[in-house]
Image (spheres, rainbow, N blue to C red):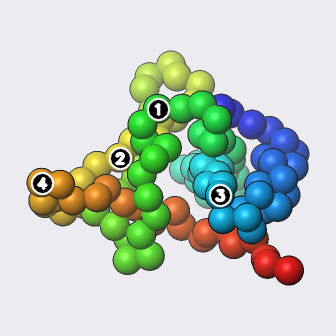
Amino acid sequence: ELLTTEESRKRQQEYDKYVSTGHFSPALLVVREHLPSGKACLRLNIDATRIGNVARFINHACDGGNLSTVLLRHSGALLPRLCFFAARDIDEGEELAFSYGDVRQGHRA
């Protein structure tokens, strides 16, 4: 689900409340694509908490994991695709994981 920045911030606040219960795992990602000029970037707010493909179940790894992410653009496409590639050889049965980048942790009261 592609969100505006305003909606993304609202949902993050909502999700922070639910995370503290330990029974909720949001999948809200902010992806920034820097333009070649370096003067601006495209911000994509992606929420796969409720809908999405199987990639939304890939876990976070502090060590970078075994997957790397790449933004790919197809000629004429308005938005890039976030793609996953093996960062190294992956053993059969090994859990897939990637670094979410700067992970925002909700504070606990």
Q: Amino acid at mark 1?
A: Asn
Establish if 54 lies above or below 17. Answer: above
Q: CA distance from mark 3 to mark 2?
A: 27 Å
Q: Amino acid at mark 4?
A: Glu
Q: Secondary structure at mark 2?
A: strand
Along the line of sight, the residue nearer the viewer: 11 or 77: 11
The quadrant of the picture occupied by the N terminus is top right
Mark identifier at residue 53: 1
Q: What residue lies at 63% left-to-right and 42% top-to-bottom?
A: 49
Mark identifier at residue 23: 3
Q: What residue lies at 64% left-to-right and 35% top-to-bottom?
A: 50
For the question of whether residue 15 can be seen, the reply is: yes
Q: CA distance from mark 3 to mark 4?
A: 29 Å
Quadrant in the picture for residue 15? bottom right
Q: Earlier in the sequence, mark 3 or mark 4?
A: 3
Q: Is residue 92 left or right of residue 74?
A: left
Question: What residue sits right under mark 4 in the picture?
Answer: 92
Q: CA distance from mark 4 to mark 2?
A: 17 Å
**4 and 2 marks in contact (CB < 8 Å):** no
Q: What residue lies at 44% left-to-right and 58% top-to-bottom?
A: 59
Mark identifier at residue 84: 2
Q: Amino acid at mark 2?
A: Phe
Q: Earlier in the sequence, mark 2 or mark 1?
A: 1
Q: CA distance from mark 1 to mark 3?
A: 21 Å
Q: Nearer the viewer, mark 1 or mark 3?
A: 3
For the question of whether residue 72 can be seen, the reply is: no
